[in-house]
């Protein structure tokens, strides 16, 4: 997994991994979630990929838009 840049300095996101139709996000609690096209929506996943790569806004986007629309909790 790639370390999230956290340019804003206050994100709960620590790591992420991008796949063609999904993204895995690990939070500072250690909880890790899989978000994918079928559960989260293609537009949301693509936006999450952009935010993850930019290193800013991913945690806020998850909290305000995606919320609990993840495919599964990995750990």
Image (tube, rainbow, N blue to C red):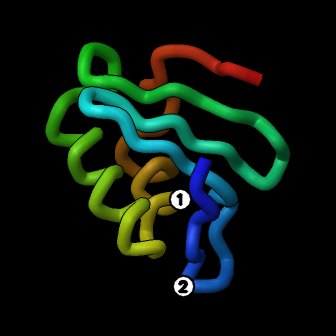
Q: Residue at x 32, y 52 (%)?
A: 49
Q: Residue at x 43, y 69 (%)?
A: 57
Q: Position of residue 16 (x, y in %)?
A: 55, 49
Left or right: residue 71 versus residue 49 is right
Say which residue label 2 marks: 7
Q: Residue at x 51, y 50 (%)?
A: 63
Q: Position of residue 71 (x, y in %)?
A: 47, 16
Residue that extends furthest to the right in the rendered view of this protein = 29
* Secondary structure under the numbered disc 1 in the rendered image: helix
Cβ–Cβ below 8 Å for labels 1 and 2?
no
Q: Give the vertical position of 57 relative to 28 (above or below).
A: below
Residue 18's tag is none
Which marked residue is nearer to the observer: mark 1 or mark 2? 2
Q: Nearer the viewer, residue 39 or 65?
A: 39
- Residue at 67% from the left image edge and 44% from the top image edge: 26
Mark 2 surroundings within 10 Å by alpha-carbon count, few (fewer than 14), some (14 through 19), many (20 or more): few
Q: Circle 1 is placed at which residue position? A: 59
For the image, the number of numbered tags is 2
Residue 75: quadrant of the picture: top right
Which image quarter: residue 30?
top right
How far, Cα to Cα, is label 1 from label 2?
12 Å
Given residues 41 and 1, the one toward you in this image is: 1
Q: Earlier in the sequence, mark 1 or mark 2?
A: 2
Eyeballing the image, is 72 above or below 68? above
Residue 69 lies, in percent from the top left, at 43, 25
Q: Residues within 10 Å of mark 1 (few under 14, many from 20)?
A: many
């Amino acid at each position: 997994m790639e370390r999230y840049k956290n340019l804003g300095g206050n994100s709960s996101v620590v790591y992420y991994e991008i796949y063609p139709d999904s993204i895995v996000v690990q939070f500072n609690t250690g909880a890790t979630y899989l978000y994918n096209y079928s559960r989260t929506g293609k537009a949301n996943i693509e936006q999450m990929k952009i935010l993850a790569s930019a290193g800013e806004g991913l945690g806020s986007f998850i909290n305000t838009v995606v919320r609990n629309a993840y495919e599964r909790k990995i750990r």
